[in-house]
Image: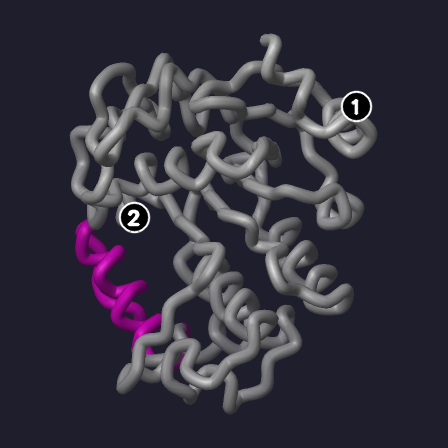
Amino acid sequence: MILEVTNLCAKAEEPILRGVTLRVPPGQVHVIMGPNGAGKSTLAHVLAGHPSYSVTAGEAVFCGQDLLAASPEERAHRGLFLGFQYPIEVAGVEMDRFLLAAINAKRKASGEEPVTPQVFRELLEKNRSLLGMGENGTTREVNVGCSGGEKKRNEMLQLLMLDSKLAILDETDSGLDVDAMKTVAEAIKYFLSPQKSCLLITHYDRFLQYVRPDAVHIMYNGRVVASGGEEMVQKVCTSGFEWARRL
């Protein structure tokens, strides 16, 4: 199992997660849907180790190891990737230098030698081509002056370059036009393998036309109240989330 979350409770100033339980097997795309304030983004941030949240109960196991006991850096080195709804700008740091530093930090944590410049450039070119990015896209400062679609492409480039095991993508379809949405979806499908999984948080069904989920989880009031297949998406589209209040 890639991710096993059991009765996870967490708070900021007030309790937000109230007993989240879900399982993400390898090689699968799992989707989380729910109304605003349900705890979807909080779950993503807690799994990534955001310091603003405190875990008060439950457990999270990532690839057989305790996730909650690890620092955010350790979680990333183990292969957990968090894609933000609103990627930040990092002025003064060029994307290719950022990627090289991130890759080598991960390799160092695993006891590996730094990647050679030639291997890095070949990998960068392959993934840049997949995402339809020009060379200037990776020599610019990270996300500075980028459109919403460009920022999401940058995140997909990071995901592919870092060779992570679990991609947690928080509303990665937010602000994307149709072409950018298709590109991001293709990147997710390219990323997936029998050893890698994706946990995708979204409000809408449109993105799921391009990334077909293996399971859909409905969050309400800090819990996963229902899980199923694509029929859950249709239920949300036709009935909203009012029915989840009763579960």
Give the vertical position of 145 relative to 164 (above or below): below
Which residue was labeled with disc 2?
76
Neighbourhood count class around disc 1 (C-alpha, 10 Å): few under 14, some 14–19, many 20 upward = few
Nearest to N terminus: mark 2 or mark 1? 2
For this view, does 19 lie left or right of residue 106?
Answer: right
Residue drawn at point x = 31 percent, y = 74 percent = 98
Q: Element under label 1?
A: helix
One can see residue 30 in this view: no
Residue drawn at point x = 31 percent, y = 36 percent = 46
Which residue was labeled with disc 1?
231
Judged by depth in the image, the label closer to the viewer, 2 or 1, is 1
Residue drawn at point x = 59 percent, y = 45 percent = 192
Q: Position of residue 89 (x, y in %)?
A: 36, 74
Query: Magenta residues: mostly which secondary structure?
Result: helix
Q: Are marks 2 and 1 in contact (CB under 8 Å)?
A: no
Q: Position of residue 220 (x, y in %)?
A: 53, 23
Give the vertical position of 200 relative to 139 (above or below): above
* In the foreground, 201 or 246: 246
Reply yes or no: does residue 117 show up in magenta: yes
Q: Which stretch did the figure color magenta?
A: 98-119
Question: Distance between the Cα atoms at labels 2 and 1?
Answer: 33 Å
Q: Position of residue 228 (x, y in %)?
A: 68, 18
- Of the residues shown, which amino acid type is indicated by label 1? Glu
Give the vertical position of 218 relative to 211 (above or below): above
Reply yes or no: does residue 112 show up in magenta: yes
Give the vertical position of 68 relative to 125 (above or below): above
* In the foreground, 5 or 116: 5
For this view, does 213 lie left or right of residue 16?
Answer: right
- Of the residues shown, which amino acid type is indicated by label 2? Ala
Q: Position of residue 119 (x, y in %)?
A: 40, 73
The quarter of the picture where residue 179 lies is bottom right
Residue drawn at point x = 78 percent, y = 34 percent = 237
